Image: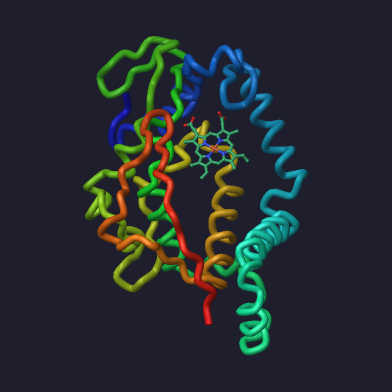
Amino acid sequence: MLCGTEAIREALVNHAEAFSGRGKVHIIDPVFRGYGVIFSNGERWKVLRRFSVATMKDFGMGKRSVEERIQEEAQSLVEELQKSQERVHKEIDQVIGAHRPPALNDRAKMPYTEAVIHEMQRFADLIPIGVPHMVTKDTQFRGHMIPKGTEVYPILSSALHDPRYFEKPYTFNPDHFLDASGALKKNNAFMPFSVGKRICLGEGLAYSELFLFFTTILQNFSLASPVAPEDIDLTPRKSGFGRFPQTYQIQFLPRQ
Ligand code: HEM
């Protein structure tokens, strides 16, 4: 188990090649049988990773077209949610007028929104024990000899709740990602997508979606809960390989 920000970074970034193997996930392995970019190893993984990155680039990842597609998706989600309140909307449209959808280059000017999204990902801690790695060769690490083939779990939760990097690790607080002047602050322990050679391949896409969906929804609605805030139970429904939240009721209140 790799616990804590430094241990995870030292292994997955400083010894990136040695720790780039994929360990076994026993309930999933019989399905994937070592195929697919997530569960493959060696030359097969290298080829698949290069192929996947190239394919995503061909499909326009990081280009304007993907941004537009996500905006459309976000917009249609908003439209779904707005259907029952069409009258209110007409009124809003007449009084306020049409708004342009949020765009990715707004991010730089929205440090607080960015901090909230970072904090949501940190607090949600979706993949607490990470996806197992495997050392590809005998490796000296922090005075220990780790034999080739050893499975290594980067405990992402230990970084996302590292008290040396987050003042109140178990409290939702966007200030964790803001400096004194209100600018977005990089935090080395923020690694919901992991780090190093096997870092999530969809990081850019997932983050773009989170930003565009979140800002599009909040541009159009205020969110509320029918339950008093102090009665909301934040204990996850299940916590194992994934950390699944409970089911909540949420109110989308169209903004005036
Ligand atoms: C919020 C959403 C997501 C989170 C939190 C997340 C997190 C992760 C994590 C922790 C890993 C393991 C990294 C490691 O082995 O150290 C991973 C791997 C991976 N993710 Fe994601 N992911 C997300 C969305 C996506 C999306 C949208 C895609 C596809 C477009 C994607 C594709 C992959 C792939 C292909 C790998 C395996 C990379 C490899 O083994 O080389 N992920 N992800």
- Figure quadrant of the N terminus: top left
Residue 115 seen anywhere in this rendered image of the structure: yes
Residue at (66% x, 67% y) in the render:
83
Which image quadrant shows ligand 1?
Answer: top right
Looking at the image, the residue that sits furthest to the bottom is 95
Looking at the picture, does residue 176 appear above or below residue 24? below
Seen in the picture, residue 120 relative to 143 is either above or below; the reply is below
Q: Quadrant of residue 46?
A: top right
Q: How is the image coloured?
A: rainbow
Direction from residue 8 to residue 74 in the image, left or right: right
Q: Position of residue 14 (x, y in %)?
A: 41, 32
95 relative to 250 in the view: left or right: right
Q: Is 123 on the left-hand or right-hand side of 255?
A: left
- Say how many tags the image has: 0
Residue drawn 51% across and 36% down?
199
Q: Is residue 40 left or right of residue 2?
A: right
Task: Kindly identify the residue that appears in the image at 30 percent across and 60 percent down.
Answer: 173
* Residue 124: % across, % down: 39, 46
Quarter of image, res 217: bottom right
Write the residue at 48% across / 70% down. 110
Residue 180 horizontal/vertical position (percent): 29, 70
- The image quarter containing residue 239 is top left
The picture places residue 138, in percent across and down from the top left corner, at 40, 12
**Along the line of sight, the residue nearer the viewer: 94 or 7:** 94
Residue 9 visible in the snapshot? no
